[in-house]
Image (spheres, grey):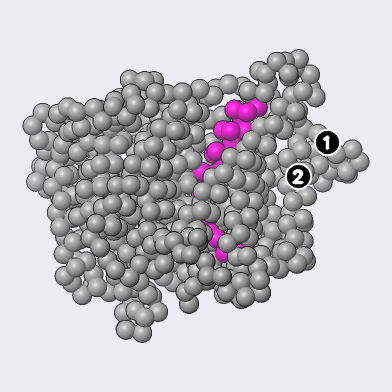
Amino acid sequence: MRLRLEKRLDDRWWIKPLVALVSLMLALIAGALVMECASIPYYKAYILMLEGAFGSVYGLSETVVKAIPLMMLSLGIGIAFRMLLWNIGAEGQYCMGAVFSCAVALAFPDFPMAVMIPLMIIAGFLGGALWGAIAGALKAFFDTNEIITTLMMNYVAIYFLEFLVYGPWKDPTGYKFPMTAMLSPSSHFQQFGNTRIHLGIVIALVLMTLFHIILTRTRWGYEIRVAGENREAARYAGINITRNIILVMIISGGIAGLAGTCELAGIQHRLQHGFDLGYGYTAIIIAWLARLNPISTAIVSFFFAGLIVSGDHLQMSLGVGSGIAEMIQGIILFFVLAGELFLNYRLTFRKDRR
Amino acid sequence: MNHDDFLIVAIIAAAIRAGTPILLATLGEIIAERAGVQNVGLEGMMLAGALSGFATYRALLLHPWFCSASEGNTLWCLLGGVTAAMFCGGLLAFTHAFLAITTRANQVVSGLAITIFGAGVTSFIGKVFVGIPATGFPNAPVPILSAIPVIGPGLFNHNVLVYISYLLVPLIWFYLFRTRAGLHLRSIGENPRAADVMGINVAYSRYCAVVKGGMLCGLAGAYLSLAYTPGWTDQMSGGRGWIAIAIVIFSGWNPLRAAFGAYLFGGISGIQMRIQAAGALVPTNLLLMLPYIFTIVVLIISTRGIMRRIVSPPAALGLPYNREER
C-alpha cells in the first residue's frame, strides 16, 4: 500500500466547508494542547472565550466594534493580494490615515459636523493612500520587495505618530500623558443606541459592496484578477501593470487609512501612544481565510473580532498573558493552510505493483 | 588611547553587538532561500528562540543540580538555554517546511502564520518571565587578538555567541560555494527538477535547509534574551527578523555580504543610540525611524541597475516543487 496525492479533478460542493470545519476543529484542539502545556484549563478557557465575545449584548456589540477596522484593513489587504502584492503595511497605513484625519480635526475644530466628517474621511484615505503609494511606486518602478518596504514603513508610521503625540500635538493641559487633546465633538462619529458601534460599520459595509462589484462586474476588477494570476499574460493582453500596481496600492492603503479614521472618530477621539491596535497581521489572516472575497471577508472579520474580544475577556478573567487570540489565529492559519492541500489534491491509497 | 580611537572602538563594538542577531537570522534565511524556500517567519522564530532560551536558562538555574551558582554552572545553564532556543526555532521552521514543502501552501502566508503564532504564543506564555533579571553571557576577550589596538577591543571583546557568528559566516560561505553538498543545495533552489533528475532528494534537502535556518534564527533569539539584553520582554525582536529578510536580498544570498550588511545596520542603530544618548536636538521618535528608513534605502539600491545583475534570487525561490507536474 502506498499513499499518493492526486490532482483533484472533480469539484464537489461539500469539500470546501468540510475541510474548513476539520481545519478549525484541529486548530482548536492544537490550541488546547498549548494551553494545557501552559497549565491553563482549556475547556474553561474556551467557554469563557465564547461567552466573552458572543454571550452578551455588550460582548456582541464590542465584537462588531472590533470588526469594523478589521473588515476595512482586510478588504484593503485583500485587493492588494489579488494582484499578488504583499501589502504587510496595513498597520502603518492605518496610523497615517488617523494622523491625517486628526490633523484636520485639530486644525479646524470649529467646522460643523457635516463638513468635518467628510473632510476627515478624505484626509484619512489620502494619508493611507500616500503610505501605500510609496511602496507601490517603489515596487512598480524599481521592483523593490514590497513585503519589506510596507513592513518597514509600519515602524516609520508608528514612530511618526508617537513623535506627534509626544511632541507638537501633545495636549498642553494633559499633564505629561503622550496624547493629543480630545477632538471637538463635531468630529465624533454617530454611535448607535447604547453601544459603541459607530458610523464606521456603514462605511465598511459600503466598501464591501463596492469591492464586490468592482471585482466581479468591472473591467478594472478583471484586470486586477488577471494581473494577479499571471502577470506575463496580463502584460501581453495590454494591461498596464505599472499603473495597476500603484493604483491598487493607493486603494489598499487608502482603505487601511480609512480604518484609522474610523477608529479615531468612532472610538478613541484622540491620538495617543499605543493608538495602533496591532491588527495588521490579523487582517492578513482574515483576507487569506476569506480567499480575498469581499463578502467572506466581512464574515471572517466578525469571527476574528470575536476571537480578539474573547482573548481580552480571557486575559481579564484568568489573568493570563495577552496574545492568546493571536496564538489561536496563528494555529488556525496553520491548519487552514495545510487543509488547502485537500482542496487541490486528494489522498489515494494504491497497491504497489510488483 | 585618545578620544577618537575610543569613539571608533565604541562604534565598532556597538555595530557588532547590534548586528549579531540580525546576522544570525540572515545566515539562516540564506540557507533556506538558497534551497528555494522563502521563510518570512524569522520574527516568530526569533521570539520563540528568545523566550524558550530564557525560560530554559531560568529553569536550569533554579534546578538543584546547578544550585551552587558558580561561574561554570551559570555557563552550562546558558548553553542549555541556547540549545532549547535552537530547538524551538527549528521546530517552528519544521512547521513552515511542512506547510511549504509537503502541503505546497503559499510560502509568504505560511511564514506570516509563523510570525503571528510566534508573537502570540510568546506573549501568552512569556508573561510570567517579564522583568526577571538575568546575567547573560559574560564578555570573554579573545587572549591575543583583543590586544590589537582599536580593532582588538572592537571586534574581540564580546561574548561567545558573537564569536560563533564570526565562525559561521566563512563556514556557511564555504559550505554553499565550495562543497558538493552546498552545490546540491543551490541547485535545488535554482532548478529543483534538474536536481531531482540528478538523484537529489529535493523535499528532504529542503526540509533540512529550512530547519537549519530556523535553528539559526532561534540562536539569534537566544542572543537577544541571553546576551544582548538579558531577560525577556514582550516582542523583544523588534522587527529584526524583517530587517534580516531585507539584508538577505541586499547580500545577494551571500553570507560574506550578509555580514557586511548586518554590521552596517548594527552600526546605524549604534550611532542612532549614541546620538540619542548625547541628547541631540532631533526627537527620539524620529531617530528611532532611522534604521527602518535605512533598510528601505538599502533595499532600493540593492535591487537596481548593476546590483540587480549581481544579486539575482534563486530561480525557484518561493515555488513549491511537485515532481508530477510540469
**Residue B309 percent across, percent down from the top left:** 61, 75
Instruction: Give the prevailing secondary structure in the magenta stretch.
Output: helix
Disc 1 is placed on an element classified as loop
Mark 2 surroundings within 10 Å by alpha-carbon count, few (fewer than 14), some (14 through 19), many (20 or more): few
Q: Which residue is drawn at 77% across and 65% down?
A: B179
The answer to whether residue A134 is seen in the rendering is no
Q: Which chain carries label 1?
A: B
Disc number for residue B141? 1
**Is residue B94 shown to the viewer in this render?**
yes
Location of residue B138 (image quadrant) = top right
x and y percent of residue A42 in the render? 38, 27
Q: Earlier in the sequence, mark 1 or mark 2?
A: 1
Q: Quadrant of residue A245?
A: bottom left
- Residue A177 appears in which quarter of the rendering? top left
> What separation in Å lies between label 1 and label 2 (alpha carbons)?
13 Å
Question: Identity of the amino acid at label 2?
Answer: Ile
Coordinates of residue B296 in the picture (x, y in percent)? 51, 57
> Mark 2 highlights which residue?
B164
